Image (cartoon, rainbow, N blue to C red):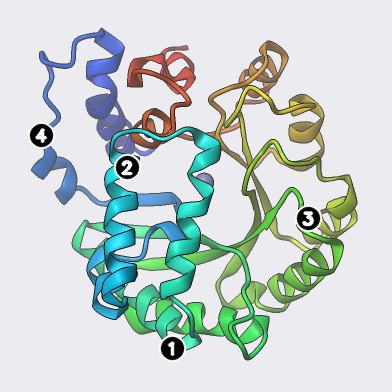
Amino acid sequence: MNKWIFSTLSLMLAPFLTGSESDHPAPFEYLRQLQKAELHLHLGGAYPLEYLLSIATPQQGEKLKTALDLIAKRVAYRDVFPFFQLVSQIIDSEEKVQKGTKALCLALQEDCVGYVEIRTSLKNLGNGYEAYLNAVLNGIKEATSPDFQANLLLSLQRNSNPEIAKITVDLALKHLSSGVIGIDISGDSCVSQIEHIMPELLRAKEGGLAILLHIGESPDEIDQVSLIENMTQNRIGHGVQMTDDARKWIQLHRVPLEVCLTSSVLVEMIDQPNEHPGIQYFRQ
Ligand SMILES: [Zn+2]
């Protein structure tokens, strides 16, 4: 592991590894100035708030602020998804997508993020799915600098219909050399399994796309082990609420986890950051 990543991780996790937060206050400004990679970022949840408020109607802006206040007080995992619709109502054209993506990339650069993977599901805002994809790619291009690189993951949900899955995989493969690197499976992890889109996911995999899987977000998920086995050894998003078998599988195959202690607490996956299984994996 790269030395600076390891030392940063150790520093950030120290309070949780030792069980004492107050002994090791995280030096925020020091961490902010370190070069970082951001590997789990949903475009719809990451547009800079300033940008959203600058284009929202006063009513939309108020609703958004109220929603953010609610989330800050903790919201059950399955109740979070409707909040994303507020953002979709504000970002309702390709032009806004492009400007918002650029604003996001510039904000990340200010936080010294040198590499980011942005996830988004394709949307038809009036000019087709590829127009949306091009808007995101153009927004990235406009913010590119020698110290910053961004790639894109196209998201499918477990209950995405096969037609959308086909369009998404087609476009991901078409843009494989221009910034799209994989398929992300996200959305409510309890709503269905993915057999109906499996042929498309396998086609994506064979075509050279990475498959990243959100799993372990809810104790109500089923067949975790077969899902991981079939779909991904690349990376797992969250991996908090895993069955014992799935945990063993992750450890045995050393599958990297994308961990966000803050979001796991805010959407009530865990009560305290030090209960996150990522801490246990790190110790081991
Ligand atoms: Zn996610």
Let me know if residue 147 appears in the view.
no
Q: Which of labels 1 and 4 is toward the front?
A: 1
How far apart are labels 2 and 1 at the CA level?
29 Å
Q: Which residue is rendered at x = 62% and y = 74% of the image? A: 123
To which residue does mark 2 refer? 70
Residue that label 3 marks:
205
Residue type marked 2:
Leu
Circle 3: residue type: Lys
Of residue 54 and residue 170, the one placed in the foreground of this image is 54
Seen at 78% across and 68% down, the residue is 164
**Sooner in the amino-acid sequence: mark 1 or mark 4:** 4
Q: Which residue is mark 1?
A: 95
Per the rendering, the mark at residue 115 is none
Disc 2 + disc 3, Cβ < 8 Å: no
Image mark for residue 27: 4
* CA–CA distance in space, label 4 to label 2: 27 Å
